[in-house]
Amino acid sequence: MVPLLILVFPGCLIAAFAFTGYAFGSLGRVGLGAADRTVWLRSAAGLVAAVASLLYTWGLLYVVGAVVEAAEGGTESAPVVDCVTPGQEERASTVVDYTVSYVPLGFVCETYSGGSYTSDTVPDYVNPGVLVLALTAAGMALTLRKYRPRSTV
């Protein structure tokens, strides 16, 4: 689980920079004045994808923090601090392990009875925001397929 986090976190940052570079590179190749609707849409899709990637990385920071805290909990390791929900402390006393959910992003607490629940570690706006932004970028990219110039040959 931790080696995957080590790969996903920098991968998301690299993706954000790549999408941003793609967006500004598309505009830079033709210039702002000469850019048509397709170029602007391509650039906007790249920027929206970059923001989605950064938002996912922001949520991933919370998950990484929870994993580090659970791994090095010391005397407070039982129950896992991130699994304690206000008003439901008895549920946290049955937690025996944790996992990371990448889609949707979350810190999942596993109980000794075989059940599990997602803690409140990741802010509530992260998963819906990433979903909306990713679908918007994908919709813009699909729209580009419709407006692709056809060859006259």
Image (cartoon, grey):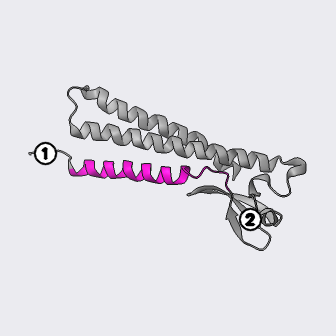
- Residue 11 lies in what quarter of the image? top right
Seen at 90% across and 50% down, the residue is 75
Amino acid type, callout 1 = Ser
Query: Foreground residue, 4 or 127?
Result: 127
Query: Foreground residue, 59 or 34?
Result: 59
In this picture, residue 64 sits left or right of residue 22: right
Q: Is residue 35 above or below residue 136?
A: above
Q: Mark on residue 110?
A: 2
- Residue 137, position in %: x, y? 38, 48
In the current view of this chain or complex, which residue is farthest to the front? 87
Helix, strand or loop under label 1: loop
Seen at 74% across and 65% down, the residue is 110
Q: Which residues are magenta?
A: 120-146
Seen at 21% across and 26% down, the residue is 33
In this picture, residue 11 sits left or right of residue 23: right
In the current view of this chain or complex, which residue is farthest to the bottom? 113
Q: Is residue 110 above or below residue 50?
A: below
Q: Which residue is mark 1?
A: 151
Magenta stretch, main secondary structure class = helix
Are the residues tagged 1 and 2 within 8 Å (C-beta)? no
Query: Foreground residue, 11 or 107?
Result: 107
Q: Is residue 121 magenta?
A: yes
- Residue 39, position in %: x, y? 26, 37
- Residue 13, position in %: x, y? 54, 38
- Residue 51, position in %: x, y? 46, 40
- Residue 40 lies in what quarter of the image? top left
Q: Mark on residue 142?
A: none
